Image (cartoon, grey):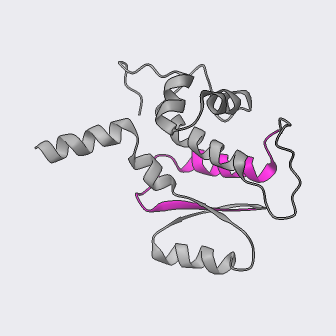
């Protein structure tokens, strides 16, 4: 997903992800992305990281004024997304994130299975397939297909 003509910076990744530059810097500091080799798919990881850092589970105490290290379930979720991008990601892929990790699902059957599994506990759904389709190179490819 990287072309020689594209130069990615933390600020540009944050802008494309729709998060503050501080979120991208924090993601880099915690090892979610590598500042020495930024690629387009880091946009999805930074967007996911930004969503995860705002999550607080019921009965969890998490002071907003303290910097917190990556929680275990956050690390599992980020690594699951990293491993899936781009090969296992389809437009309807999503991560069902719960307090002990996450489940990557694509399509109605796996969605239902994840929902039944998580029916009695809180979870967050991250539409990473949609986020992946919103990457600049994917947008340009769709635009060129539409123009042809």
Q: Please provide percent x and percent y for residue 55.
A: 72, 53
* Up/down of 53 relative to 89, above or below: above
State the quadrant of the N terminus.
top left
Residue at the image position 46 percent from the left and 75 percent from the top: 108
For this orientation, the residue located farthest to the left is 148
Residue 88 visible:
no
Q: Please provide percent x and percent y for residue 104.
A: 58, 61
Residue stretch in magenta = 69-98
Residue 47 is left or right of residue 31, and the answer is left
| Residue 109 on the magenta segment | no
Nearer the observer, 56 or 77: 56
Residue 135 is left or right of residue 46, and the answer is left
Residue at the image position 60 percent from the left and 46 percent from the top: 48
For this orientation, the residue located farthest to the front is 65
Q: Please provide percent x and percent y for residue 71.
A: 80, 47
| Residue 72 on the magenta segment | yes
């Amino acid at each position: 997903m990287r072309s020689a003509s594209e130069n990615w910076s933390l600020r540009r990744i944050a802008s494309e992800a729709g998060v503050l530059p501080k979120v991208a810097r924090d993601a880099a500091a915690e090892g979610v992305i590598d500042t020495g080799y930024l690629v387009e798919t880091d946009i999805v990881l930074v967007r996911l990281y930004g969503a995860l850092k705002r999550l607080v589970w019921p009965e969890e105490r998490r002071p907003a004024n303290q910097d917190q290290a990556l929680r275990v379930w956050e690390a599992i979720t980020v690594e699951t997304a990293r491993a899936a991008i781009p090969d296992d990601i389809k437009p309807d892929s999503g991560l069902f994130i719960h307090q002990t990790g996450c489940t990557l699902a694509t399509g109605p059957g796996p969605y239902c299975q994840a929902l039944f599994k998580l029916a009695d506990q809180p979870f967050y759904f991250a539409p990473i397939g949609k986020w992946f389709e919103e990457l600049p190179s994917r947008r340009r490819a769709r635009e060129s297909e539409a123009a042809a």
